[in-house]
Image (spheres, grey):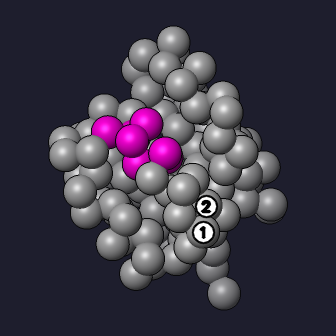
């Protein structure tokens, strides 16, 4: 069974790039484009890993991580945060489910390494 990864990202070009990279690595990829839809999508997909953008319409990534950390049914999903603002990495330092941070533009080799480490491959 393929491991499932959920990409929560509002930029279609980034979604497509990450989707292709992750599918090439053998993962089943699901996507969601808004913070408002993220919780329902996480519950429906039950991903092995979430790739989460910081700047999202509706709820931002920091708010989503806080909500997830306070909900026992969501707090165990590992997350890799992505952002063009490297200083936003500090916002997530106190959340154990955040397993990595990738700055945009992506270094795809490093991205794949982080995904494999976070997902246990």
Quarter-of-image position of residue 98: top right
On residue 17, which mark appears?
none
Quarter-of-image position of residue 49: bottom right
Q: Is residue 96 left or right of residue 24?
A: right
**Mark 1 crowd level (few <14, some 14–19, many ≥20, 10 Å Cα):** few
Q: Position of residue 121 (x, y in %)?
A: 80, 61
Task: Name which residue lies at 37% across and 52% down.
Answer: 8
Magenta segment: 60-66
Task: Name which residue lies at 35% across and 71% down.
Answer: 41
* In magenta segment, residue 4: no
| Mark 2 touches mark 1? (CB < 8 Å) | yes
Q: Mark 2 — residue? A: 75
Task: Name which residue lies at 45% across and 53% down.
Answer: 67
Task: Name which residue lies at 44% across and 77% down.
Answer: 43
Majority secondary structure of magenta residues: helix
Q: Position of residue 10 (x, y in %)?
A: 24, 44
Q: Is residue 5 left or right of residue 9?
A: right
Q: Quadrant of the N terminus?
A: bottom right
Above-or-below relation of 88 to 106: above
Above-or-below relation of 51 to 107: below
Above-or-below relation of 65 to 44: above
Residue at the extreme front of the image, as rendered: 70
Quarter-of-image position of residue 48: bottom right
Closest to the observer: 36 or 115?
36
Q: Position of residue 4 (x, y in %)?
A: 56, 72
Above-or-below relation of 91 to 19: above
Q: Is residue 106 left or right of residue 12?
A: right
Distance from disc 2 to disc 1, alpha carbons, whole Å, reads 5 Å
Q: Mark 1 — residue? A: 72
């Amino acid at each position: 069974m393929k491991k499932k990864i959920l990409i929560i990202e509002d930029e279609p070009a980034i979604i497509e790039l990450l989707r292709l990279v992750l599918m090439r690595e053998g993962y089943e990829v699901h996507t969601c484009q808004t913070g408002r839809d993220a919780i329902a999508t996480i519950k429906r997909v039950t991903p092995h890993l979430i790739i989460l953008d910081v700047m999202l319409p509706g709820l931002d990534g920091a708010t989503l991580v806080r909500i997830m950390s306070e909900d026992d049914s969501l707090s165990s999903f590992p997350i890799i945060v992505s952002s063009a603002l490297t200083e936003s990495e500090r916002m997530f330092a106190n959340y154990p489910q955040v397993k990595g941070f990738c700055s945009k533009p992506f270094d795809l080799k490093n991205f794949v390494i982080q995904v494999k480490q976070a997902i246990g491959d």
